Image (cartoon, rainbow, N blue to C red):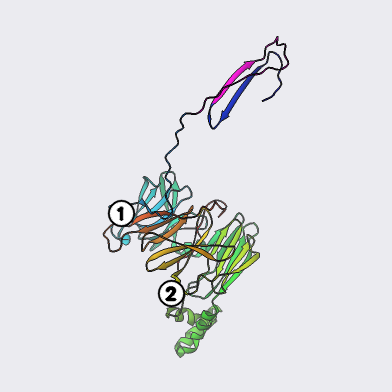
Amino acid sequence: MLFSATKGESVSFSFTHFKFNPLSRNRKIPTRAKEDTIVYTFNMEFIREQLIDEMWVPAPGVPRVIFKSDVLHVSDYEILQNGDMLLLTYPKQLKKGSRLLLYDGKDVKGNFEIDAVAEELVHDFRGNPHIVCKEEVLGVYVDRNKVGLATLEKDYYMKYIAPIVDTNKTKLYFSNFNKDYPAFDYYSMDRLDSAYTRILEIEDELMMELYRSEYKWVDVRTKLWAKNKEIQTGIDAEIWVGMNYFTQSIYYKELYAPLFHRNDTLFVFDYYKDFLRIFDADGNKLDSIPIYHHYDKRHTGWESKLIQDRITGQVYAIFDRAGYIYLGWVDTKTGAINQHVRLEHRYAHDIQVFGNHVYYIYRPFESAQKKYLWKERLPYDFGSAKIQESELVNTDRDE
């Protein structure tokens, strides 16, 4: 180390190195120094011992219990952005009484009794958790170790909040999906100027043809009713008949074409055209990649369900083969699934992926044991991705 200093000046030296103890010394330059160069030698001591916190590094595929109780079943759960979990639990039957627990992986930090008849835990497009009940929706607010609930009208939530599947800094992404109609559209709305843009239309053409043709086979009274509805609403009589009759048949299947958002890119799985559609954040089309993992469902066990890792943004397809769940990582560059990872326990359900780990609820088949929350590490090491501006969100939709 070379530096210049004047005679009589005090100089401070500080040295750090990961192998040595830190060293600090002060030296004063002699006022009567005859040489123009002064050499100082400092000796640092090796660190003999360094303690670090205990770390648990599980091997991939080895299951570990995250939460168990001799009194409560785990019915549903939500993983918060800070790693804490909200657990919807019940002692005997969910409809006869439930409790909401705030759990950090070791201790229960909050315990809240739910008076309403709870059904499931969900989160909205901002990542905020909600409890869907029979008559209402409860918004959940978490502040450190406290849990607060606010009541929302169920119709309002389902009509204005649930259809929004994702958002970025200035745009909302939503759909007009209706489970009783074999087509829907994805839209984006710019919150700066309230401009709407249609991103993509999803339609099952064969199902639509059968849906509309149902009108030909109903009786005259039903046709008259449908025509009156058409006059009142402007919606085709064929649609009224299809919605009220064909949807009750074994031939009708709800559409499933989920949208996912990762790093300012949108991925739409259009299973009815066999393409993975890729768009930028403004809804401009970038690419279309063929996909085929949804074929031969009887052989592969395809469950018509995709889930997204809410940390890494990676997408996984779920397969069920004789009760064993397989997760297939979807390569969004090729559309292929190159590896299937089998979960250890049979009949696992309520599966989520968070930070290269898979979580699920499980209890042994025909056992009196309570339902526990389990966790397994996946054989991947994907880094974090930008899923949403402020909070993380999962954009899958259950059938």
Give the residue furthest to the bottom: 220
Horizontal side, residue 287 vs residue 376: left or right: right
Q: Can residue 228 be seen in this view?
A: no
Give the residue furthest to the top: 32
How crowded is the residue under tag 2: few (<14 C-alpha within 10 Å), some, or many (20+)? few
> Which residue corresponds to mark 2?
298
Q: Choose between 224 and 343: the one closer to the eye.
A: 343
Query: Residue 72 bears which disc, if any?
Result: 1
Quarter of the figure with residue 88: bottom left
Query: Residue 251 bears which disc, if any?
Result: none
Amino acid on which the number 1 mark rests in the picture: Leu
Image point (67%, 12%), residue name: 30
- Position in image of residue 119 (x %, y %): 38, 61
Is 238 located above or below residue 191 in the figure?
below
Is residue 383 shown in magenta? no
CA gap between label 2 and label 1 equals 36 Å
Query: Which is in the foreground here, disc 2 or disc 1?
Result: 2
Tell me the quadrant of the picture where the C terminus can be found: bottom left
Dominant secondary structure (helix, strand or loop) of the stretch shown in magenta: loop
Q: Choose between 322 and 177: the one closer to the eye.
A: 322
Q: Sequence-wise, which precedes: disc 2 or disc 1?
A: 1
Amino acid on which the number 2 mark rests in the picture: Arg
Quarter of the figure with residue 333: bottom right
Is 367 located above or below residue 69 in the figure?
below
Q: Choose between 170 and 345: the one closer to the eye.
A: 345
| Element type at mark 2 | helix
| Element type at mark 1 | loop
Q: Choose between 380 and 139: the one closer to the eye.
A: 380
- Position in image of residue 52 (x %, y %): 45, 36
How crowded is the residue under tag 1: few (<14 C-alpha within 10 Å), some, or many (20+)? some
- The span shown in magenta is 22-47
